[in-house]
Amino acid sequence: MQKDLKIGMAAGLAIAAVAGLWLCTRPSLSVRERMSPDTDRPVEFDGPPRYTTNLPGVEPLQTRQNGSAADNTNNEPSTRRDYSDLTIYEQPEKIRTQKFHIVRNGETLSHIAQEYYGSSRKLRKIIDANKDVMTNPNRLTPGTKLIIPD
């Protein structure tokens, strides 16, 4: 086992050294080279953007017949705000979250009602909400998932 470990360490060190030497000898991979602008290639634009946004206060680009973007003649940002395309979502009622309880071994409905409602007398709420799950409220099967209503 010791010999395999030494061979693995030596092979890993050799691979790391070769990779380091390769990276050091490539000037195009240096940080300075990657940060400098590429002045050999001219910048080309391939027409208007291929996406649109519907943001308030942002006007969409108007296009000419040839597909290039329209010029802004006064070179000032637009201050016109058009909210006609905004969609307003209204919730008719508040979304209610559902609580669940998984029955553990030895639990009764009165213990569960005491845990969630602070009173063991409110077990009728749990029984009414779980009529399809419980056949006999006096015998709870461990692992049963009960709905705990508010």
Image: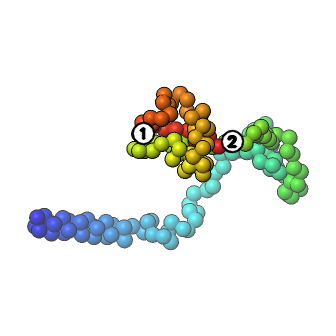
Q: Residue at x 64, y 51 (%)?
A: 44
Q: Nearer the viewer, mark 1 or mark 2?
A: 1
Three-letter code, disc 1:
Gly
Q: CA distance from mark 1 to mark 2?
A: 27 Å
Q: Is residue 47 left or right of residue 62?
A: left
Q: Amino acid at mark 2?
A: Ile
- Relative image position of residue 40 (x, y in whole percent): 56, 60
**SS under mark 2:** loop
Residue drawn at (42%, 39%), measured in percent from left and top?
143
Q: Quarter-wise, where is residue 68 in the image? A: top right
Q: Position of residue 42 (x, y in %)?
A: 61, 56
Residues 117 and 55: in front is: 117
For label 1, the SS is loop
For residue 84, say whether it is visible: yes
Please tell me in which quadrant of the rendered image residue 63 appears: top right
Asked if 41 appears above or below 86 in the picture, the reply is: below
Q: Tell me the number on the disc at residue 95.
A: 2
Residue sitting at x 66%, y 49%:
45
**Residue 140 at what x, y percent from top left?**
45, 36
In the figure, 134 relative to 62: above or below?
above
Which labelled disc corresponds to residue 80? none
- How dense is the environment of label 1, judged by Cα within 10 Å: few (below 14), some, or many (20 and up)? few
Q: Is residue 93 above or below residue 74?
A: above
Q: Position of residue 4 (x, y in %)?
A: 13, 64
Tell which of 132 and 3 is nearer to you.
132
Q: Which disc is residue 143 wearing?
A: 1
